[in-house]
Image (cartoon, rainbow, N blue to C red):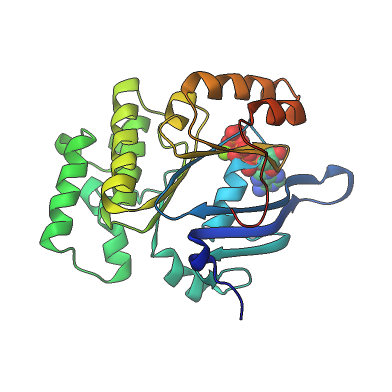
């Protein structure tokens, strides 16, 4: 009998994942034989230089893009090769915050935040309403609930996308630079909300970030360079993360991985 990813404590997993764009001399290898799992009940940060494949990895893990080679699972469900209908059903278990915030222009803030319920045909419970109101207040959106996305700043739109990802209390949240467009105070509030989603609600989070302070809130940090995972670390301080990133960005990927690693580099399929 196969061992299921959930029995390994993984909420999402990829094995021997590769992604190529284009062909021949003009082709780009965005991901090169990546095997990794996102652990249940953990806050995982994904870091790496621009173009290292972070968004591509996150999109494939969340079932929003397909691999060139390799396989992907969400919980026990293999998503590789699934059709749109099945994928959409599985994606309802996830919360997303992506670089393009994917807000619906014709819906106001509250409508956008409630979209996961709308799409799932579910009425929010009183508890859902309470949680959503708390998130809206914590993110400083209370004065904006009836505004449409084009009436909001970039950072406000980003906060709406974060509120939407938290609204339905999903077991897994994928976030691509959720604090990228935010000022320091709001960014910290977002990290506090994400941390408390893990600590109080047992949710699992995978977050791409360039910010060492943001990554220092994580339980685990994966470092990507040139489409490969070059280090897989436990919690680190912002200073340690900055140093590791500097070494990666200076191009010494292998050396950076080795010296960043307090523990041996692990890129095995078992997370
Ligand atoms: N649709 C596409 N067509 C062609 N190449 C692409 C496409 N999407 C991404 N790439 C390339 O794949 C590589 C990885 O891109 P990706 O967006 O995953 O990087 P990233 O680590 O998220 O970078 P950033 O930190 O700048 O967001 C890059 O070289 C990028 O140019
Ligand atoms: Mg990206």
Left or right of 59, for residue 214: left
Residue 162 % position (x, y): 34, 43
Is 99 drawn above or below residue 268 in the view shown?
above
Residue shown at 32%/53% (left/top)?
202
Left or right of 197, for residue 33: right
Residue 157 % position (x, y): 34, 38
Left or right of 21, for residue 45: left
Task: Pick the quarter of the image with the N terminus.
Answer: bottom right
Residue in the foreground of this view, choosing between 216 and 172: 216
**Dividing the image into four equal quarters, which quarter contains ligand 1?**
top right
Residue shown at 33%/40% (left/top)?
195
Count of residue discs: 0
Is 181 drawn above or below residue 60 in the view shown?
above
Q: Is residue 146 visible?
A: no
Residue shown at 47%/22% (left/top)?
238
Left or right of 50, for residue 194: left
Residue in the foreground of this view, choosing between 194 and 102: 194
Residue in the foreground of this view, choosing between 230 and 184: 230
Q: Is residue 187 visible?
A: yes
Residue shown at 34%/50% (left/top)?
165
């Amino acid at each position: 009998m196969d061992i299921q990813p959930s029995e390994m404590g993984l909420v999402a997993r990829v094995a021997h994942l590769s992604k190529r764009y284009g062909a021949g001399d003009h082709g780009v290898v965005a991901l090169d034989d990546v095997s990794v799992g996102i652990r249940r009940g953990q806050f995982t940060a994904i870091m790496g230089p621009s173009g290292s494949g972070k968004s591509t990895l996150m999109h494939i893990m969340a079932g929003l893009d397909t691999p060139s080679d390799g396989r992907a699972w969400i919980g026990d469900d293999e998503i590789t090769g699934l059709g749109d209908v099945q994928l959409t059903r599985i994606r309802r278990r996830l919360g997303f915050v992506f670089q393009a915030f994917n807000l619906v222009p014709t819906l106001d803030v509250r409508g956008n935040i409630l979209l996961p319920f709308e799409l799932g045909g579910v009425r929010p419970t009183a508890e859902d309403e309470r949680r959503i109101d708390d998130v809206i207040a914590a993110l400083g959106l209370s004065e904006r609930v009836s505004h449409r996305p084009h009436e909001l700043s970039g950072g406000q739109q980003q906060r709406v996308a974060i509120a939407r990802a938290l609204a339905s209390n999903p077991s897994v949240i994928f976030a691509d630079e959720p604090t990228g467009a935010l000022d320091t105070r709001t960014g910290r509030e977002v990290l506090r909300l994400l941390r408390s989603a893990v600590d109080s609600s047992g949710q699992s989070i995978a977050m791409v970030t360039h910010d060492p302070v943001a990554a220092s809130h994580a339980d685990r940090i994966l470092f990507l360079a040139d489409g490969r995972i070059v280090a897989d670390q436990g919690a680190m301080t912002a200073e340690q993360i900055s140093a590791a990133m500097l070494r990666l960005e200076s191009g010494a990927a292998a050396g950076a991985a080795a010296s960043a690693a307090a523990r041996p580099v692990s890129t095995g399929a078992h997370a």
